[in-house]
Amino acid sequence: MTVMLILIVISFTLAISFLAAFLWAVKNNQYEDTFTPSLRILMDNDKNNEENNDLRINQVN
Amino acid sequence: MAEHSTASSNEYQANLETFYYDNGIVKLFAMATVVWGIAAFLYGVYVAFAIFMPQLNFGSEFLTFGRIRPIHTNAAIFAFVGNGIFMGVYYSLQRLCKTRMFSDMLGKLHFWGWQLIIASAAITFHAGITTGKEYAELEWPIDILIAIVWIIFGLNMFMTILKRRERHLYVAIWFYIASWVTITVLHVVNSMELPYTWLHSYSVYAGVQDALVQWWYGHNAVAFFLTTPYLGLMYYFLPKAANRPVYSYKLSIIHFWSLLFIYIWAGPHHLLYTSLPDWAQSLGTVFSIMLIAPSWGGMLNGLLTLRGAWDKVREDPILKFMVVAVTAYGMATLEGPMLAVKSINALSHYTDWTIAHVHVGVLGWNGFLTFGVLYWLIPKLWNTKLYSKKLANAHFWIGTLGILTYVIPMYIAGVTQGLMWKQFTPEGVLQYPNFLETVTQILPMYMIRATGGTIYLVGACLMVYNLVKTAKQGSFVKNEKDQATPFPFQYIKETGERQHRWLERKPMAMLFVATIVIAIGGAVEIIPMILIKSNVPTIASVKPYTPLELYGRDMYIREGCYTCHSQMVRPFRSETERYREYSKVGEFVYDHPFQWGSKRTGPDLHREGGKYNNSWHYWHMNNPRDISPGSIMPAFPWLLTKEMDIQSVSAKIAAMMTLGVPYPVGYDKVAPQDLKTQAKLIATQLVAEGVTDVKESAEIIALIAYLQRLGTDIKAK
């Protein structure tokens, strides 16, 4: 059952990398504000429809 | 953001950058999602009918159940849901990062690469080219292609994240990252295989080790392909569709990290009561139960987002789809841990209960969330309104009816058959010793299920019509304008700033690719080396397969026999009475790959060897109904005439020797001769049993040799 050892090592490595990502996120103040991000994603709604109507004709890249 | 709001409007204007979102790639993936979705449902309906009408293979090996079922499952998971993930990620990631995708070219490569993989999957599965490991059936060249395309996707995604204009990574992005990282590791580890021709290979793992790796992969494919990316989509598209923030952003963060740490350990729950060591089984169960908490955190967060907005749900078909999707997610993630409890699993495993469970997940959670996203997204991309809300509502109700008509009969079938397998008479003998009796009992349920699947497909067809009409009435916005202030830490504001940023990013890209390549290379080197050493047989009487048996085993894999037959007798009295001695871990040490199976549409075959004589198998394969009237197994008459491909035998044996199977040195050279000798013997026996027209070189001989060998190594003398 050597494979178990391998899987455990791989799974732990994954878990540790996730932990590192988590610590980075905390250190990076990603979670300082746990409310406004949920509002911010709502704010880009449809605001450029007028311009996009023109864009369709010009097909800007 | 806070600093900018206090800055004067002039400064703010100066900082503002204009950029364009790439909707072209989203459109491609959206169309692929719809097309492959319909294909996956069609194949599903086909197998649902074929399971009780074996004549539906029209006498063709290419259309037989064992080959079609993997097409259905792979199409549903990797083609339908896969493209759905990419559609959602390419749309939401750009908006969440306030930037265009890193590279249009990588996006295109990703798209066409993925479609090429799907097309090759369809062709190779029809042709019987398969590794025989569930949900990882694709052969090695396609596995390599998957790795390349997946890395292209990852590169594009990570570089987009790096060049973002939004400091905070919204929770959906975390879900995407975790999914990508984990799927990479799972795919590489589970796809370790040794090629012996351009299209065939053997798993480097054998028996119980292969089983553990496979279900570690299989479970996490569900976790990190069907679940976490879709949770990411839920956290973006549900608030967008409802136009209200997620119920608790804090909860979403907590539930993400806890889900991530627990999910990876639950795989062994697919192997309860098998020969897997007991402690590993218990570990799987414990982590599965723990999973309820983070899973329900996600479900509640999704549903509570709609608190106070249920009037909207009544009106809006998009929200209806999403509500049912999230509810189905909650049901499936409660049921899953329950099925991982050993005493429940003893009843449910190998029955249609599992099939019901996964379809609540895929039809309900993945399907309905995808439909909701499509109905929301297509009008957005084409800058118009949905063509018909009424039709979308009709789709919702038809789809819901389809799911119920599918899963309810499957629950009934699963419990009924599970109980019948275990039922003893007061005298202490099996009440239903004939397996077929337990199958014919549930045939009506199979028929209702097929109807349910058809209803679901009809609903999806309404959606296609509705979406096409929507796109036709609007006009596509290929590049969508947006403006944002740059990422705070990019302080260089002079001209030529873009180049600097590119130079900063380049080493990151290099580092990323290098790490992945090194990881894959290392795994390829190390894992087989360690494993071959540990494949020491624990039972002295267990011997490697003869070349003829090995040939037959590869046929067993090719025809997808494992989709309906298990090879794992569990240690229950009801099973040892029916199938004899329970399976021991030492019996599978030469099984590359393992063939334990996960469903018993037909009986377990681990102790099949010696149960019937050769001619029984001969006529049974020719037409099962000649031997057991009422059987639903497809007929395989072509095996009686098809010639064996003796050319490949040396390569097969040589590959097995490389994997550590102890054939004598140089045996690969004499193997073809041994094969012919044994084939002659079996052909002679068949003639002696009264079979006329026996062809010594026909494939059926090899299959009989394999079936007669199964489980005989440790038979009491």
Image: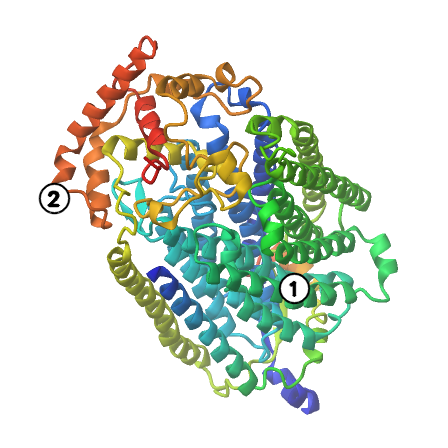
- Residue drawn where x is 28% and y is 16% of the image: B685
Q: Chain of mark 2?
A: B
Who's the residue at 35% across and 51% down the image? B144
Q: Earlier in the sequence, mark 1 or mark 2?
A: 1
Q: SS of the residue at dot 1?
A: helix
Question: From the viewer's perspective, is the residue at label 1 or at label 2 nearer?
Answer: 2
Depth check, front residue: B101 or B157: B157
Q: Is residue B103 visible?
A: no
The residue that disc 2 covers is B665
Dot 1: chain letter: B
Tag shown at residue B21: none
Q: Which residue shows up at 72% across the image and 40% down it?
A: B408
Residue type for callout 1 = Ile
Q: Which residue lies most toward the right here?
A: B311
Q: Coloured how? A: rainbow
Foreground residue among B711 and B148: B711
Q: Are marks 1 and 2 in contact (CB under 8 Å)?
A: no
x, y (%) of residue B708?
Answer: 35, 29
Question: Residue B259 in the image: x percent, y percent?
Answer: 59, 68
Tag 2 secondary structure: loop
Percent coordinates x, y for residue B189 in the rendering: 38, 58
Quadrant for residue B256, please give it.
Answer: bottom right
Q: CA distance from mark 1 to mark 2?
A: 53 Å
Please tell me the numbered disc located at residue B292.
Answer: 1
Q: Indicate the amino acid at tag 2.
A: Val
Please provide percent x and percent y for residue B410. Answer: 67, 39
Is residue B520 shown above or below B615? below
Work out whether residue A47 or residue B621 is closer to the camera in this orientation and state it.
B621
